[in-house]
Image (cartoon, helix red, strand yellow):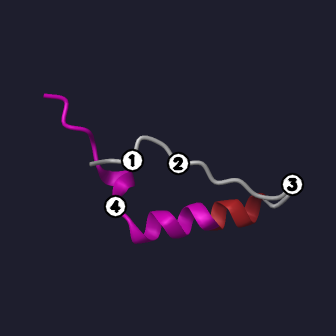
């Protein structure tokens, strides 16, 4: 199963912290490399 969406929210003007959280998730998962089975 693949996630169909994810949202990371944070405080105003804290974009660097949000991007760090996203990068940490990407580093410990392989979801960004997976493609759905279409057939």
Q: Are marks 3 and 2 in contact (CB under 8 Å)?
A: no
Residue 6 is labelled as: 2
Give the mark, 3 or 2, whose residue is nearer the N terminus: 2
Q: Nearer the viewer, residue 19 or 7?
A: 7
Membership of 26 in magenta stretch: yes
Gap in angstroms between the C-alphas marked 3 and 2? 19 Å
Membership of 37 in magenta stretch: yes
Q: Secondary structure at mark 2?
A: loop
Q: Which residue is mark 1?
A: 3
Q: Are marks 2 and 4 in contact (CB under 8 Å)?
A: no
Q: Nearer the viewer, mark 1 or mark 3?
A: 1
**Quarter assignment of residue 4:** top left
Give the mark, 1 or 4, whose residue is nearer the N terminus: 1
How many dots with numbers?
4
Residue depicted at x 64% and y 67%: 20
Q: Which residues are magenta?
A: 21-39
Gap in angstroms between the C-alphas marked 2 and 1? 7 Å
């Amino acid at each position: 199963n693949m996630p169909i969406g994810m949202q990371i929210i944070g405080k105003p003007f804290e974009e660097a912290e949000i991007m760090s959280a996203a990068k940490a998730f990407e580093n410990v998962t392989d979801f960004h490399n997976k493609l759905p089975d279409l057939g």
